[in-house]
Amino acid sequence: MLRSSLARLTPREAEVLSMHYVDGKPLREVGATLRIPHPGAHRLHDRAIVRLGKLVRAAGLSEPPPREDEL
């Protein structure tokens, strides 16, 4: 479900999320890599997170998965 939702983001939104969450880069570095100002990287990240949340909820997920320390 998450992969299919991620695939529905724009390539730029997916890239920002991947660089930040998978590669562990701070948004300042993500912005520099993408040649956009730091505030622009934050806006793109925030927009991508909101869109991803809507897509995941529309796919039927209503609660977040348990955190690792809750398992």
Image (spheres, rainbow, N blue to C red):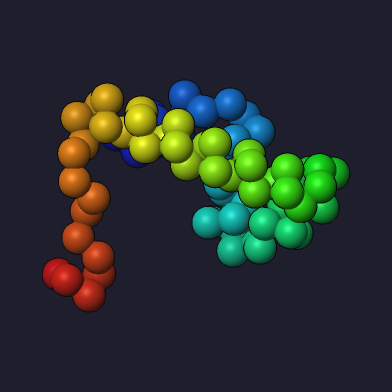
Q: Quadrant of the C terminus?
A: bottom left
31 horizontally vs 55: left or right: right
Above or below residue 5? Residue 68 is below
Q: Where residue 7 sits in the image (x, y, percent)?
A: 47, 28
Above or below residue 52? Residue 19 is below
22 horizontally vs 1: left or right: right
Q: Residue at x 74, y 59 (%)?
A: 28
Q: Residue at x 27, y 32 (%)?
A: 57
Above or below residue 52? Residue 71 is below
Is residue 20 among the parts visible in the rendering? Answer: yes
Question: How many tags in the picture?
Answer: 0
Q: Where residue 23 sits in the image (x, y, percent)?
A: 60, 59
Q: Residue at x 25, y 69 (%)?
A: 68
Q: Nearer the viewer, residue 28 or 71?
A: 28
Q: Nearer the viewer, residue 46 or 61?
A: 46
Residue sitting farthest toward the left: 71
Q: Residue at x 76, y 52 (%)?
A: 38
Q: Nearer the viewer, residue 3 or 50?
A: 50
Is residue 33 among the parts visible in the rendering? Answer: no
Q: Where residue 29 sits in the image (x, y, percent)?
A: 75, 59
**Residue 70 picture quarter:** bottom left
Q: Quadrant of the N terminus?
A: top left
Q: Where residue 60 sits in the image (x, y, percent)?
A: 19, 30
26 horizontally vs 8: left or right: right
**Residue 54 picture quarter:** top left
